[in-house]
Image (tube, rainbow, N blue to C red):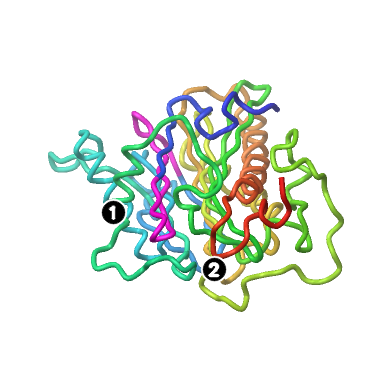
Amino acid sequence: MTPGPRDAITDINGLVVGQAQDAGLRSGVTVLTAAVPFTASVDVRGGAPGTRETELLAPDKLVGAVDALVLSGGSAFGLDAASGVVDGLRAAGRGFEAGGHRVPIVPAAILFDLGNGGDKGWATNPYAALGRAALDAAGTRVDEGSFGAGFGATTADLRGGMGTASLRLESGHTVGALVAVNAVGSACVGGGPRFWAAPWEIGAEFGGLGPSMPPAELPPTKLARPGESTTIAVVATDAALDKAGCYRIAVAAQDGLARALVPAHTPLDGDLVFGAATGARPLADPVGDALWIGHAAAVCLSRAIARAVYHAAPGGSQPSWRERFGG
C-alpha cells in the first residue's frame, strides 16, 4: 500500500473537501461532498456524540446515498452548519426527490470547542454561514492542521486540528481518511514528541521520530475539563460498497483511532467515524478486498490523526506540537 498523489481523501476520484473557519470564533466547518450522491454509513463509539441525520445511514433505512457529510465545531450549535450546506446543495438542484421536491441529504457530526477562548457570544448562530462557505470552497486540496472543524480543536496536552491521508491498495482501490482531532486523550506518548501512530507513519509525515514504549503512568487527559472533546472522522473508498459495507469500514477505522489517541472512546468523547464509498471500482473479491479496505481505513485514520496534531499552527488555547517540540 502506498499513498495517493495528494495523500488526502480527495485521492478518491470525485470527492472534494471544503473548509471554512473564523479566527475570532476559534471554530470552523469541514465538508466532504461530490458531484453525485455517494453511499455512507456511520459508527459511533464515544459516550457523548452530537449528530444530525445519522440514523438514516443504517443499512435498513430507505435513503441509499448522501449529498455531503459535515464535520463541525461548535457543539450542538455546530449542527446548524449542515443547514448552510443543505441550502447550497438545494440551490444547485441536488437532493433526494420526495413529493416533487429535492431534499439534500447531509448527515453531520460536531465536536465541542466552546471552551477554547474564542468569541462565542453571537446573537445569530454563525455555523450555517460557515457551512455554506465551506461548501463553496470545496476542491481537491485539503489543508491540514488549524483549518475547518479542527481550527479550535485540542487534545489533552496539545492543539488538535484537521488531518487527512490516503492509501492505494494492490487491488487498485483507493482509501482515504479525514479527521478533526479534539480528544480527551493525547496523540503523543507520555507528554513527549513521539506519536502513538508512529508504527503506521509513512516517511517522515509527522516528524519521523519513530515509536516509543508506553510509559508506566497514566496518560494525560482532559478529565478535569469534561465536555471539551470528541474526534470526528470520515473514511472513504472508491470501492463498490453498500451501506453495510460502509459501516464495516467505519468499524475497522475506529481501531485506527484507538491506535492514535490514548485513551480513546471515553464517556466524555463523542468519537464517530463516517464510512463512505463512491462505488466506482467493483470488488473482485468481496471478502478479501473488503478486509484490506477496512485495514487501510484504520491505517489512514491513525496517520491522519497524527498529521492533524503535527501540522497545527501556534496560537491556540494550548501549545501546538511545533511550539513545544520544534520542527
In which quadrant is the N terminus drawn? top right
92 lies left or right of 24: left
Q: Which mark is residue 128?
A: 1
Residue at screen point 46% across, 41% down: 243
**Which residues, given as a range, are shown in magenta?**
20-40
Q: Is 162 in the magenta?
A: no
Direction from residue 312 to residue 76 in the image, left or right: left
Secondary structure, mark 2, is: loop
Q: Main secondary structure of the magenta part?
A: strand
Count of numbered marks? 2
Counting from the top left corner in percent of width and height, residue 289 is at 64, 29
Q: CA distance from mark 2 to mark 1?
A: 26 Å
Q: Is residue 30 magenta?
A: yes
Amino acid under disc 2: Gly
**Which residue corresponds to mark 2?**
47
**Residue at 43 percent of width and 57 percent of height:** 27
SS at mark 1 in the image: helix
Please state if 278 lies on the left or on the right of 125 as rendered: right
